[in-house]
Amino acid sequence: MPVSPRGTRNRSLRLPRHPARRYGRSSGNERWVSMTTYETAPGEGARLGATRRACPASPPSLVGRVVARLLGLLLAGAACVPAAAAETLTGTALIRERIALPQGATFEAVIADISRADAPARPLARTVIDDPGQPPIAFAIGYDPAALDSRSFYALRATLRHQGRLLFTADTVTRVLQQDGPHGVELVLKRAGPDSSGPAGPLPAHGLRLPATFRGTLPFADFEGVRHHLDLWPDQYYQMRREWLGGETSPSRRDEIGRWYADPARDAIVLHGASEMPLVWEVKGPDRLRQTDLAGNPIESDRDHALTSDGTLEPTELEDLFMLGRMTYKADTATFEECVSGVHYPIAQDGGYGALERAYLEAAPRPGAPVTVHVEGDLALRPATEGAARASLVVDRFIAVRGDDACTRPEPQAALTDTYWRIDSLIGDDVRAQANRREPHLVLHGGAERRFRATVGCNRIVSRYEVADDALTFEPGALTRMACPPPLDALERTLLAALSLTRTARQEGQTLDLLDAEGMPLAHLPAVYLR
C-alpha cells in the first residue's frame, strides 16, 4: 500500500474504491464517488478512511491509468485534480535561524491567486505536513492547470506553526506558475515577531518590548471573564478586541483602535480610543501588563489581572468600528487616515465602497485632495502587493462627509514633570541605547517631594531635585549597585557629572536642555511617548 511522506495530510487526494459506487448526483463531467483517503501521523503507517468528495470522473476504460496516476500523486502529496491534467509544484522551505523546531509543529504551503488587491487571496491548492522534522522541508502541491487564468498572478505562501502559534512565515511574495517558469521553488521563512538573527534592540523608556500582541482573560463581574487581544505598536497606536464570556447581556464583543501614551508617574501606559474613558495598564515587565481600576489605581486582588506577550505581533481583525478619517483617491487607489491613531489603511473596493467613492468625488475640491469622512466598517487583513497581509478598511456603511477641522489632532504637549525625557546627548557626546537595556532617560516626578529618577540603561539613579523658574538642580543620587559593562559604566559616570553640574533648564516645546552655571549645554533630552 502506498503511503504519504512522513506526517503529510493529503487533504484533497482520494482513490476511488470502485467507479460504480456513487453518492449524490452527476453534474457535467463531475460525479460524487466514494473515496478512500490516506493519512499518516508521525511515526505511523498510512491510515485508511472513507470520505466523499467531488472529483472529475474518468472514462471507465481509463481506470487503470487513472489509478496509477493517482498513486503517483499520492506519493508526491498532491491535490485531487483531474488525473490526465494534474501538475505538481515542488519546493523546499528553509529558515535562517539555527533553531530546532518543536515536536508537533505544522508546515503549510498554499498557492493563491493574488490578482485582486481589494479582495482576499483565493487559495488554489495547498499541502499540510504535520511534524515535518527539521529544515530544509521538502513539499509538493498538486494543482489543476485548467483552473489557471492567464490574466491572474499566483503566489506561494508558507507558514510553520506550533499549537496554533505562528513561528515562521514567508514575508515576501514568491510568484509561481508563470509561463515557462520553474516548477521547483525555494522559500526562506522568517521568524515571526522580533528578528533574533541579529542583536536585540534596546527597550524603550516605558519598558515594553514592541511591537507585540498581549493576551489574557481577565475577571469581570457577572461574566466568566473578558478575553483581551491587545496589539501595541511602538508608534503609539493600538487596536484591541474584548469579548465578554458566558454572559447574557450586551455587549458580548467590543473592538476599538486608538493611541497610547506613557505615564511615568504610574509606570503605566494609557489607552485613548473608543472607550468611555482612558484605560490604564501598569507595565510589569517587557512582556507583561496589569489591569488597573477605572481611576487608574492598582487592583488589590489575588486573581490574575495580567495580559502577557510572547514577544510577537499577530494583529487581529476588528469589526463594527465607527471611524472618522481623511480619505484620498489617486490612481484608482483609495486610502484612509484614521483621525485618532493617524494610521493609514487601504480601502477595499467592496461592501459599501461605492457610496463612499461617490461622496468623495462630489466633495473633493480637486483630484486626490483629502476629504474627511465618517464611516462604519471593519479592519480586515487583505493581501498586500509585497510582504505579509495588512489591515484594510472594509466599508459597511458610508455615514457622512465632515468638515476639515473634524480630524484635527492637537500637537502633543510636554510638561516638565511626569514626562519621559530621553537622553540623546551628554556633555557634547551622542548617547546610544544598548541592546536589551532601557533607553537612557530622565523623569522628574511631580508632587511635593520633587523626586527624580534617571538611568543610562544600567543602574537607576534616584534622588530629589529643586526647581524655580528656569533654575534646576539635582541632589546627589542613590544608585542601585549593578556592575555596568562598557560603555554603560563610563556613560553612567558622565550622567552623574552632568546632573551635579546642572544649574538651569531650558524647555522649548518637546525638548529639554540642561545647562551649567555658565549656560553651557550639559544634556539634550527630547520628550517621548507623549499623549
Image: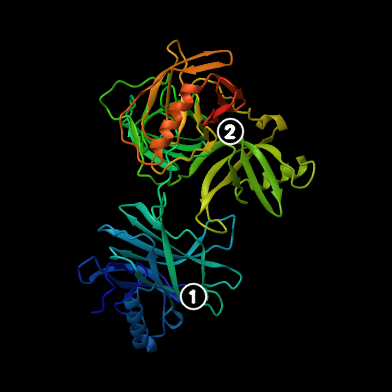
Extreme residue in the right direction: 365
Which residue has dot 2 on it?
340
Kind of residue indicated by mark 1: Gly
Q: Is residue 186 above or below residue 447?
A: below
Extreme residue in the bottom direction: 61
Left or right: 300 in relation to 425 = left
Q: Nearer the viewer, residue 290 or 121?
A: 290
Q: Is residue 74 above or below residue 275?
A: below
Q: Nearer the viewer, residue 238 or 199?
A: 199
Residue at left offset 32%, top offset 72%? 34
Which image quarter: residue 135? bottom left
Q: Position of residue 367 (x, y in %)?
A: 77, 47
Extreme residue in the top direction: 448
Q: Position of residue 240 (x, y in %)?
A: 46, 37
Which residue has dot 1 on it?
28
Kind of residue indicated by mark 2: Val
Q: Position of residue 154 (x, y in %)?
A: 53, 67
Q: Work out how far the residue at label 1 is from the one at label 2, CA to CA, in angstroms.
A: 55 Å
Which image quarter: residue 74? bottom left
